[in-house]
Amino acid sequence: MVDNAKLKDVAKEVISREDVRLLIGYRPGTYGFRARPAFVENSDQVDELIFSPACVSNLSSYLTLEEKTPLPRGVEPDLRKVAVMVKGCDSRALVQQLVEKAYDREHILVLGIPCRGVVDMAKVENRFPGVISGEIAMEGDNLVFSFDGKEETVPKEELLAEKCKRCRYPTPLISDLLLDDEVERFADDDYSDITAMEGKSTEEKWAFWEEQFSRCIRCYSCRNVCPMCYCEDCVLDRLKPVWARRSVDISENTVYHISRAYHLAGRCIQCGECERVCPVDIPLMLLNRKFYRDVEELYDYEPGIKVEEKPLLSTFSVDDKEDFIL
Amino acid sequence: MAEETREGFEPNIVAFLCNWCSYAGADLAGTSRIQYPSNVRVIRVMCTGRVNPLFVMNALQQGADGVLVSGCHPGDCHYMQGNYYARRRFTLMRNFLEYLGVDPARVRMSWVSASEGSKWKEVIEEVVEGVKAVGPMDQFKRRQLNW
Amino acid sequence: MNGRPKIGVYICHCGINIAHTVDVDEVVKFASTLPDVIVARDYRYMCSDPGQALIVEDINNMGLNRVVVASCSPRMHEPTFRKTLITAGLNPYFLEMANIREQCSWVHEDKIAGTEKAKRLVESAVVKVRRLEPLEVKEVDVEPSALIIGAGIAGIQAALDIADAGFKVYLVEKTPSVGGHMAQLDKTFPTLDCSACILTPKMVDVANHPNIELLTYSQVEDISGYVGNFEVKVRKKSRFVDVDKCTGCGACAEVCRQAGRIPNEFDEGLGMRGAIYIPFPQAVPAKYTIDKENCLFLSRGKCGESPKCQEACEAGAINFELQDEIVEFKVGTIIVATGFDIFDARKKPEYAYGVYDNVVNALEFERLVSASGPTGGNVVIPQRGKKKKKKEDEEELGPVIPKNITFIQCVGSRDKSVGNEYCSRVCCMYTAKQAHLVKDKIPDAEITIFYMDVRAFGKGYEEFYDRVRREGIRYIRGNPSEIFKRGDKLVVKAEDTLTATPLEHETDMVVLSVGLEPRSDRREIIDILKLSSSPDLFYLEAHPKLRPVDTATDGIFLAGCCQGPKDIPDAVGQAKGAASAAMILLASGKVKVEAQTSVVDEATCRGCGFCVEVCPYSAIELVEINRAGWPVMVARVNEALCKGCGACSAACLSGSIQQRSFRDTQILPQIEVLGVK
């Protein structure tokens, strides 16, 4: 686990650099065991920084979310680097953003955090309800929860986020500074959730998804949190043409979810943020992962691995499968 | 909305055809007076590479019971590569729609060259039969609001 | 927009072709109820003069600004009706056609179903035409000059034709001399005229032609731009010889310390040259070149006391300080004529090429039979690479004249095991020719040819093949499996497949009739010009039948063997074809570019470059723009390069790049009306 004292030292050094304008990391949240993003602009602010299994969010989203407000005439844009802390999974978002030329490599400074997993906060809050303030640490294969002056140890398997249980890349794939020793791959993905869904009948599938989609309130959280959804103007918001109407009903909701998932085909890097933030618990990763698995199986392609990779749907092989084509 | 019975059900199929091969192939079927079912409505594009897979979704939402995308055989694309891109995109979209419970019979793709008027007929017959067998598409058809 | 859409819909009966199974009256009635439709009419033949006049009249009298014609396929009459719109002063792209003949009345006998479908198709056209925008048919000027890459026979011929027509030609050749492979050949089949005799006058012509700028020992480094306006950058490699001073006297070559030590490429390594050399006596330009890898002074910094060549050169042409020169110029059109490589017979180890001196390839053999070759035209067993070591022995032994020569055809052709499925087209005939030449020079030689099939398809070829067989040359149908040595003889192991007899054939010398391959450096041109390759890796023509000299990129043409194996007449024919294709552009001086191109909304483009990757024509690039004070990258379309396929539009996630006339805003309404039953 990353030593928080070292993390603060590194952060202090980084934010003091002339060529760095902002450091994005984690700090304790305001409720329960939660952590939240920290935006550090000067060295006084580094003391609040932490890393723990509570640091679930993917900070790479902020790189593309940051609004470029219009500059008054004559004002030069601040193009200094943004430093960002990323776990293994999050780092893949950076790689994919670079594949898609979202910004230049030299505009970011990557603080890589080799990671042994983060918690599923819903499970944690279920296990320890009503805790006002607490901390989580990882010791070996256990999670240690400190709250109300006591400590409780839980095997990490029980409270780990689902994505961590199939994590292939615990060590960041891109980094300028690695904050800890590399972590060996400790899990793999067997796509059993996808094959289970595929095994259902057409009617069963639609019944399942109809129920899921009908609950969607179209809050767009899944889109907004996604590190890969950063179009200036999302087609799903457009009035010319209208791809999806505003009305919240099964038809428009389904279209929203198909469009969102398709736009992530060959791009989703499985950070799981969409599913984490969904207020109505739609299993969004079950959608994204279908594309993910197909892309890997059919085209031997995994997004967010190599910066030099070409975008999946902008490439083809003459030998691509086509057994369904008449 | 009263659902039509499967017997006597005439599906409505939207087809996207590339200008150079499949549209020309469909024209050839016409000049050869080859008769085929009238269920297919064609939208002409210059290349299957233009067809956004979300068009398929859109057509199914707008009331189409099936969608067909047809282009040049691999290697024959007028623009060299468009059909290869289309093939990838549609493979993924079709698998995904199937995963959601949309019967794959509704989402079809074919290669029909400018000389394959009779293949065009066969494709239409197969697509129409396939969609007839699975019935009307109403899973996420847009409900028209009556104020 | 052109104000509120005012649409006229014109339904054609096409005699009874449409009216027979489509109730035209009903379609007219239906069309007139559609939004923005001002008038809907029918006519027996819309495409006839009165039919078109009807449209023009309505445009003028009713102020129509959009037209739908429901008739035959747009592939048939779209150009006709676009012209009609122009006649009426309307932008030709305010037209949409509904194909109610080929795709409706002719294929559906049921009048009710046919009428219903026709209505849908008309409605689809109406909703699309409402959203169409005026497009400009742009013309770009054509720079009246051509670049030809490669100065073999194809490049030379194309250059002469274009130059004779009065246009400037830049002819770029990688090696020190023009001439290409044809210059290496002895006689040409089937007429047996001497290759050099027919080629060298053309070589001299390109050098002297006032309209041709010859850039030998030069390489194209970069080409940008588009049809009519290519910008070319060529590197003229330093010869270390001032070509203006060099008289071609050859005094330098005689004194070079490396003279006779370096295998001469022109003689396929069978003859030797020095570090300063001229590839062959008739080379054009007749200027010497220092090969810097082998020049002692240039590679080691020291050549005895001082370089002898410099002393010997009375003209003072040798200058070791000379640097490469970069030449830049503009051309309107480009012909690629980069030629071929011969198959490397080492890839068929069973034939022991490179192991035994008396196994040679056909191009080496060509140099052996050539009077200008290293043996003065005497067919002898070459003493490859031994010249230096055994110089004395060799003189004692004298050249060995083979009395039994065996040719093996299809080496590296029609052979999947080496990746070449294709037929090289020239080997059958040049083998017959070489066999004939041997007969000429060594009348008592026994000659055997192993073949798979003999393909004598050209003018006079079959006759020549017959003649060679009558000369007593033995053809055995079989593909040898192995060549090995027994005593001082070579043994060719094969099966005569006509008699199903395995045989071992003893011989003094084997000539491998190697095939033609795409050049090993073909990628250089692919990278510069973004050409495509066919599966055989030769450059791909735009259409195998109807556009055999064009490439997918406008203004770039192919000539000669870079597009596929060819004999000399075909290469020359194709070169003349490419030259005339290029001259169409040069002569007209203008070229129309596609109007239904893609366009980027720079306000929403996120610069991901998906469209750039997808575009088969490299028509899109990322450029930096200023967005409210911030530098951001966005895609930009070069409209002269865009061919209007729309692949970019489907790749774009934010809908920021759209193909004109096929925008999402134009297609989605079509889907909407066609979706409804």
Image (cartoon, rainbow, N blue to C red):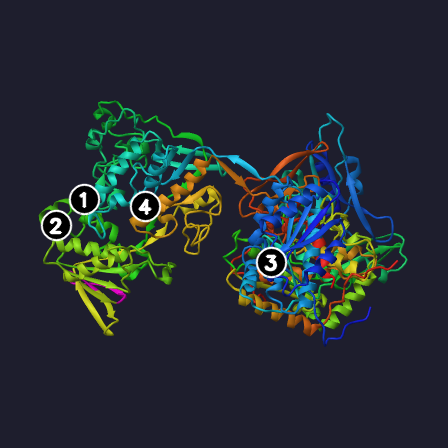
Labels 3 & 4 near each other (Cβ < 8 A): no
From the viewer's side, name the closer residue of C167 and A33: C167
- Name the residue at 26% across, 22% down: C316
Q: Secondary structure at mark 3?
A: loop
Which tag, 3 or 4, sits closer to the chain's start? 3
**How much space separates mark 3 and mark 4, taking CA atoms?**
48 Å
Q: Chain of mark 1?
A: C
Q: Nearer the viewer, mark 1 or mark 2?
A: 1
Labels 1 & 2 near each other (Cβ < 8 A): no
Give residue C428's position: percent from left, percent from top.
26, 58
**How much space separates mark 1 and mark 2, taking CA atoms?**
12 Å
Q: Badge 1, how many Cα within 10 Å: few under 14, some, many 20+?
A: some
From the viewer's side, name the closer residue of C48 and C200: C48
Q: Amino acid at mark 2?
A: Pro
Q: Secondary structure at mark 4?
A: helix
Residue A205's quadrant in the figure? bottom right
Which tag, 1 or 4, sits closer to the chain's start? 1
**Quick one: which residue is furthest to the bottom in this view?**
B7
Q: Which residue is mark 1?
A: C374
Q: Amino acid at mark 3?
A: Cys
Residue C572 disc label: 4
Looking at the image, is A76 positioned above or below residue A139? Answer: above
Q: Which residue is mark 3?
A: C14
From the viewer's side, name the closer residue of B35 and C488: B35
Q: Which residue is mark 2?
A: C399
Q: Is residue C486 magenta?
A: yes
Q: Secondary structure at mark 1?
A: loop
**How much space separates mark 3 and mark 1, taking CA atoms?**
75 Å
Q: Which residues are magenta?
A: C478-491
